[in-house]
Every structure is written in structure tokens, then in C-alpha cells.
Amino acid sequence: MNRINISLIILSLLFIGGVAVAFYPHAPAPAGEVVSVNQETFNGYWRQGKAELLRYELAQERYGEIREGEAVLVSVIEPFLPVTQVKYEGLPADDAAESVLKMIFTRRFHTGIYPYSMMTTVFTPLGAAPVPPYKVTATSQEWCGHTFTQVNHRDNVFEVASYSYFQDEGDERFTTDVAVLEDELWTRIRLRPSSLPTGTLDVIPRLDYQRMRHARFASFSAMASLTDFRDGDYPEEDLMEYVLTYHELPRTVRIRFQRDFPHRVLTWEEEMRDPSVPEEQWLVTRGRLAGSMMSDYWNRSSIVDSTLRHEFGLRF
């Protein structure tokens, strides 16, 4: 690749897969498909015909209390149609399929008598970083109601569709400027940690956080950092920590992951800052890796395959 003056990079637009996208702040210029590991190692892990399943013990803050629960991250490479923005399944299509990392993030926990079930899905292209995901969706189900949000990246804007049972939220469709999505940080970690944005930037909080706070879709100023990290529970692991501190929200997010490929997330925290109480009393949502499995789970739908739930350690 020819060297390009950095000032021109900042002012220019990059065309990837036919979609124009603005450069993200504090990130390297695009290079090959993956820079954190050679292609043979990458393919050997991600293109073996299976998905990576990671199970986390979850302590989820909700309604001012910490709830015991379970989170699961499902990551798999799939063919994706970037224009229609759906999975390519071999049917005739006007656009060519591209490879994406699909990451599904589920959370299950109970509040009192009733359960919460939340799921977010992120579709991030494997091409040169950094670019926004093609698509992010999030849904929340609990006994009070159901919400669904979808964000599509097209023509250098986010197209947002939001549907909710609650009166103040209702059903909305609108477009908004592109900003860093907190949801996409998890796929950036897995594909290219060096592309994580640092410094002061505008970030759109996780979609499931917005739903739990009944907040409108918007970006907020935040400070981001990426540093080495040591965890006494993982003394043999060489870890890094990505910290995102919102200036306009009482919220700090910390994600700890393996420095080396495949960059699995081992723990994370979402801290709700409350100046009215001592810091040690602040409520913190925590996730800690408790189980992992590589599986072609889409082929494991028989009753006899239910033993895999026990093997994986699922409780919810």
C-alpha cells in the first residue's frame, strides 16, 4: 500500500465494499484483513466451521441492586450482503457477499419474580479497519414489555429503527451521524485490538444499556484508554484493559482481554458512578469468563444434543 499523507487521510473518505465511511479518531490507517495475527492462524481459528461460545458469570445491576445471571458471547464468521444487510444464504442477490464477524451477546437474569432476556448482535466486516459495523440489533424481553432496536450503516449515516412497548419511547425511524458504537468495541477487540479508539471521542452507549435506562439513541463524549493489565485470577495471562469513561453519563466501562490472538474477553465491568455515596458503594455490573466451547451449534438442535448445555455449563 502506498503511503498517504495523514492530513489527507483525516480529510478524506475511504470506500470499502462500496460504502463510504469516515475515518474513526485515533485509529490506524486501513491495512490487510487482520494485523494482529497471520492469516493462517486467523483462518485456523475462525474458519474451522464452528462458532466460539463463551459463557460468563454475570452480576447485573438493575433497579439499584445487583442480580445474579449469565451472559454468553457467540462469535462466528458468516457471509453477509452489505447492501441489503442480511446473511447470504445462496439465493440470488444484487450485491456480492462479504465476510463479517457476527457477535451475539446475550444476558439473562431475574428481577424479583420475573426474568430479563436481552440480546445484541453486531455484524462487523473483516476488511480494513476501522469502519463501523454494517448492522447492530438489540432486543429486550421482560414481563413489562418488549423493545427492539436496529442500526444500519449506509451512505455514511446510521439508519435507526426503534420499537418499544413503552409510551415515551414508542416507534421511531430516523438517521443520525456516524459515531463509535460501544457495541462494536467488542468485535474490534476480537479482530484488531490496535484499532480501538483512544482519547476523547463521541460514543453511542450499548443498545441494551439504552433500553434499560429508557434512553434515546445519541452519542456522548467519553475518554478511552488502552493499557496493560494484570489480574490475580489469571496470573498466566498477558492481558490488556480498555477503559471507556463517559463524561456526560455516570458510567465507566472496563473490558479486559488477552493481548495475544484470539483476544478473548476474560472479564468486564460497567460501573455506575454515584457522587451521593462513597465510591466503594457504587454498583458495578461484572462478567467473568466461566466456560468456553467451539461448536457448530446450528447443527446441534436435537434433543440428544441437550447434553452440550451441561457440558458448556449453562444455567439459565
Image (cartoon, rainbow, N blue to C red):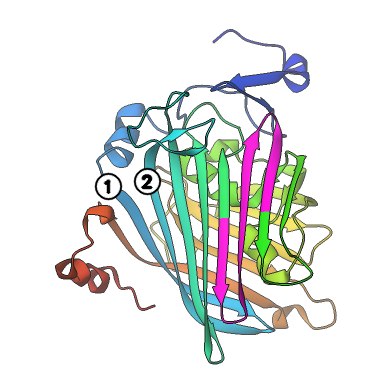
Question: In the rendered structure, which amino acid carries the disc numbered 2?
Answer: Val
Asked whether 153 falls inside the magenta stretch, the response is: yes
Along the line of sight, the residue nearer the viewer: 155 or 192: 155
Residue at the limit of the structure toward the top, as seen here: 2
Pointer 2: what residue? Answer: 76
* x and y percentages locating residue 90 in the rendered image: 32, 32
User: Would you say the magenta stretch is mainly helix, strand or loop?
Assistant: strand
Query: Which residue is at a point 30% across and 29% down the rendered structure image?
Result: 40
Along the line of sight, the residue nearer the viewer: 92 or 80: 92
Query: Which residue is at a point 57% across and 39% down the rendered structure image?
Result: 133
Pointer 1: what residue? Answer: 50
**Element assignment for label 1:** loop
Marks 1 and 2: in contact by CB < 8 Å? yes
Which segment is the magenta one?
Answer: 138-161
N-terminal-most mark, 2 or 1: 1
Residue at the limit of the structure toward the left, as seen here: 304
Q: Which quadrant of the figure contains the N terminus?
A: top right
Q: Is residue 183 visible?
A: yes
Quarter of the rendering containing residue 311: bottom left
Query: Which residue is at a point 49% across and 53% down the rendered structure image?
Result: 257
Quarter of the rendering containing residue 11: top right
164 with respect to 47 (left or right)? right
Q: Is residue 295 visible?
A: no
259 with respect to 10 (left or right)? left
